[in-house]
Image (cartoon, rainbow, N blue to C red):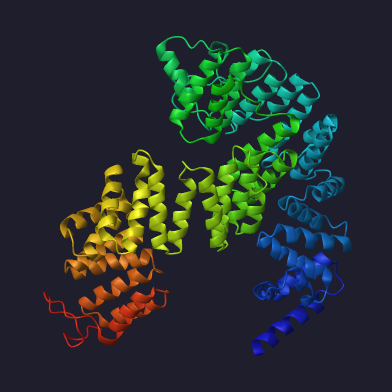
Amino acid sequence: MIRKLGMSVAVLAAMAACAGSGPVERALAFERNVGGAVPAMIKVADATGQSVSELTGAVGDSGYGAYLAGRHAEGMSDFGAAATLLDRVLEENPEDPRLIRRAFLANVNAGRFERAVELARKIDSQSPIGMGLATLIESADALKRGDYAEAARLADAAERTGLSRYAAPIFAAWARAAAGETDAAIEALSEIDADSGFGPLLALHTGLIQKQAGRLDAALRTLTPVMPDSVGPDSVGPDSSPTDEAPTDGAQTNGGDDAAGSDMGGEGEAAARAEAVARMPVRMVRAYARVRLANGAPAAEVLAMMRDYDGANPGVTIIERDIAALEADGTLEDLVVGPAAGVAEGLYHLASSVQRQAEGIALGYGRLAVFLDPGMELSRLLVSEILESRGRHAEAIEELRMVPESSDYAWSAQLAVADNLIELDRDAEAAAHLERMATTRPDDIDALMKLGYLMRLRERFDEGADVYARVLDRIETIRPEHWLVLYYRGITLERTDRWPEAEDAFLKALDLKPGDPYVLNYLGYSWVDKGMNIDRAKEMIRDAVAQRQNDGYIVDSLGWVQYKLGNYEEAVRHLERAVQLRPQDPVINDHLGDAYWRVGRRLEARFQWDRALSLDPDEELVETIDDKLDSGLETDPESGVGAESDGAEAN
C-alpha cells in the first residue's frame, strides 16, 4: 500500500511540475520526474489486457499521456500503436518538429505511407537540411505518381547521411532513366563509391539501366564478372567492386570489353569464368544471364552457366526457377519492370546489408521497398524477419501472408509463418499448416522437418519419432546432408525408450557426418548413462568437448562420464564449469549436486539439488531429487562414499 501511495505522490508531483508546458515538453519532464513509474504502469496495463491507448487516462492528460504511451509502444516495436498515439498528440500540437519526426518514423515502420508522405512534407518544409529518409519518401511518392522530374529533384536534394547517401543516387538514377535520360541516370549512380562495399549494387543498377535503354553491349561489359586470375582471389563475391576500366557510356564495368560475350576462350579461361560466376551474388548472376540472352548468347550456354552456378550454390530456389524457365523455352523474365521496381530492388539490397547491425533502419528501408513495389516479396520477407526478431509474431504472419502462392518465395514465406505460429504457442494451427504444406509437396522434407522440430520442442517425442520416420520415407537415397534427420530421429527414439532403434539412428548419423560434436555427445552420454561402451563413450565425449569447449551440455557429458567412472574430483571440475555455462539447466545442476555429495561436500550438494528443483525439472527428476534431499545418495560400492551415515560432513 505504501509503495502504491508513493508512486501516486510521485506521479502527482510530476504532473504539477509539468503544468504550463506543451504536451511533449510536459511528457519529457514527466518522464524525468517519475522515472520508471509510467513504464511500470503501462506494463501492468498490458498484463491485465488493457491497451496502451486506454492507459493514457492514467496520467491525467491525453496529450502527454498519449505521448508516453506512444514512446512505450515504440519500445515494444508496436509501431502501429505508436503511430496512432503520436498522431493523436500531433492533433494538439501539429507543428512540433520533434513530434513530427517521431510520428513520421513510427508511420514508416508501421508501413503507413499515406500518412508518412504527409509528415515527410512537413519535415522538409520546416528545415532547410531536411531528413534524408523523409525526402526519399517524397521522391518515392513522386515516382509512383509518374512525376519523374520531381522524383529526381527530390532525390538530388536528399541529405546524404547514413543509407540515404546510397539510396538517393538510386532514386535519382531510376527517375532519370524513366524520363529517357540514360547518361544522366548512369552519372547519378556514379555517386556511389565502387570501393564502399556497395560495388555490386553500383554494377547491378548500372547494368539494369543500360539494358532497359537498349545499350546491351555496355550492360554486358558492366555485369560480366572479373576473371579471378586477372585481379586476385578476393576480387569477386558479395562485396566485390567493378574494375576501374570505363565502358563507352561512362559506367564502371566488372570485366571490360574483352570479358564480354559468350566466347570464353580456352578451357582454362572458361574454368576461371565459371569460378567467377559461381562467386557472384544471386541478383548479379541473374541479371548477367538476362543480359547475355539479350546480347544473343545461345540459351544452351546461359543454361549451362546457371547449372554450374546451381551446382556451386545449391538450394537457391530462384536460380532453380530460372533454370526451369531456360529448359522450357530458353527465355527469362526481366528482373525489374519500371523505375519503382528498380528503386525497390536497390532499397532491398541496402536494407539487407545493414539488417544485423541496424535493424531499425533496415525495417524502414524494407517497408519503403514494399511501398514502391508491393510485389517485392524479398522485402516482405525481410520486414517479417525483423518483426519476428522483435517479438511481433502476429504482424510478421500478416506480412508473410501477403506473399502470393505463385511467388518464388512462397514456400519460404509459409515456413516462416509456421515459425511465428510456434512462437505464439499456436501449436495446433502450426501443425495443421505444416501438414498442408507437406501434402502440397509430397517429395519435399522441409515442412515435415519443421513439424518434427515442433514435436521435439514440446517434448511430444512419440509423435516426433513418427514425423521423422515420414521424412525418411520421402528420401530415396540417404546422403551425407541427411545426417540431421537421423540425429533428430535418434533423439525422439531415445526419449521414448526405444534405445536399440535410437542407437542405430545415431550410429548412422555418425557414418554420414563423422566427428559431429552433437552426435558424439548425445550417443556418448547415452552410453555412459546406460553403462555401455564406457571407454569409447569417453573418447567420443572428449572429442566433442575439444570441438565445443563452451557448450555446457557437452561439458556436462564429460563430467558425467567421469562421475560414472568414479572419478568424482574430476567430475566436479567439469560439472562446475558446465553449470557456469548453463546455469539454468536443472539436469546439469542435479549432476553437480551428485558429484559434490560423492566428494563429501554435502551442504553444497543439497544446495545444488534445491537449485535444480527451482529450475522447473520434469516430474521424474523432481521425484529423484526429493529422494536425495531426504536420504542422500546410496553408498558407492567402490569408494564407500554415499549415504548420510558414511563419512563426516565436509561442510
Image coordinates for residue 264, horizontal then vertical, percent: 48, 12
Image coordinates for residue 219, horizontal then vertical, percent: 64, 18
Taking the image as shown, residue 306 lies to the left or right of residue 338, namely: left
Taking the image as shown, residue 593 lies to the left or right of residue 281, namely: left
Image coordinates for residue 468, horizontal then vertical, percent: 39, 52
Which residue occupies the foreground of this view, 363 or 622?
622
Which residue occupies the foreground of this view, 22 or 607?
607
- In the image, residue 90 sits, relative to residue 612, either above or below, namely above
Residue drawn where x is 57% and y is 25% of the image: 325
Q: In this view of the protein, can residue 235 be seen by the observer? A: no
Residue furthest to the left in view is 638
Residue drawn where x is 45% and y is 50% of the image: 449
Which quadrant of the figure has residue 136? top right
Residue drawn where x is 56% and y is 50% of the image: 416
Taking the image as shown, residue 601 lies to the left or right of residue 148, namely: left
- In the image, residue 389 sits, relative to residue 349, either above or below, namely below
Which residue occupies the foreground of this view, 426 or 342?
426
Residue drawn where x is 18% and y is 88% of the image: 645
- In the image, residue 573 sits, relative to residue 14, either above or below, namely above
Which quadrant of the figure has residue 629? bottom left
Quadrant containing the C terminus in the rendered view: bottom left
Q: In this view of the protein, can residue 32 be seen by the observer? A: yes
Residue furthest to the bottom in view is 1
Quadrant containing the N terminus in the rendered view: bottom right
Image coordinates for residue 200, horizontal then vertical, percent: 58, 29
